[in-house]
Image (tube, rainbow, N blue to C red):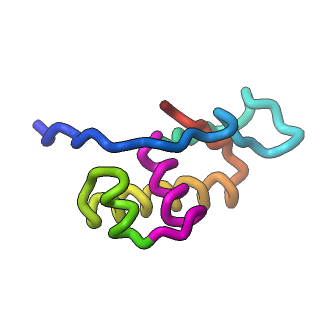
Amino acid sequence: MPRPKIPRNICGRPADSCFKPNGIPMSQLVQVALAADEYEALRLVDLEGQQQQQAAVAMGVSRQTLANVLKRARFKVADCLTHGKALMMQN
């Protein structure tokens, strides 16, 4: 049984719930889910320019946990951009 997930502080919310390529119906797209903590890690580090240690403190997790979450989030965004998939934001 895996360890319970530590609650994370999430302050920002995405402006929209989905980003997808233009001109392709949603029913024809593969959907990739971006979790709320992944979005928050991207927002703090890549948009606000915080160091990973600062962002980890803001989210209430260790720096290594933040780095793992950030790596997953960046992979998902790159996958969607490269392969034309829909990026779905979760709460």
Query: Compared with residue 5, is residue 44 higher up or lower down, i.e. above or below?
Result: below
Q: Residue at x 68, y 60 (%)?
A: 82
**Outermost residue, left direction?**
1
Query: Compared with residue 12, is residue 52 higher up or lower down, i.e. above or below?
Result: below
Query: Compared with residue 15, is residue 79 higher up or lower down, i.e. above or below?
Result: below
Along the line of sight, the residue nearer the viewer: 32 or 54: 54
45 in the magenta segment: yes
Q: Residue at x 17, y 37 (%)?
A: 4
Q: Which residues, given as a range, are shown in magenta?
A: 36-50
Q: Quadrant of residue 56?
A: bottom left
SS majority, magenta: helix
72 vs 81, left or right, is left
Q: Residue at x 52, y 61 (%)?
A: 74
Q: Position of residue 67 (x, y in %)?
A: 35, 65
Along the line of sight, the residue nearer the viewer: 65 or 85: 65
Q: Residue at x 42, y 45 (%)?
A: 37
Q: Quadrant of the N terminus?
A: top left
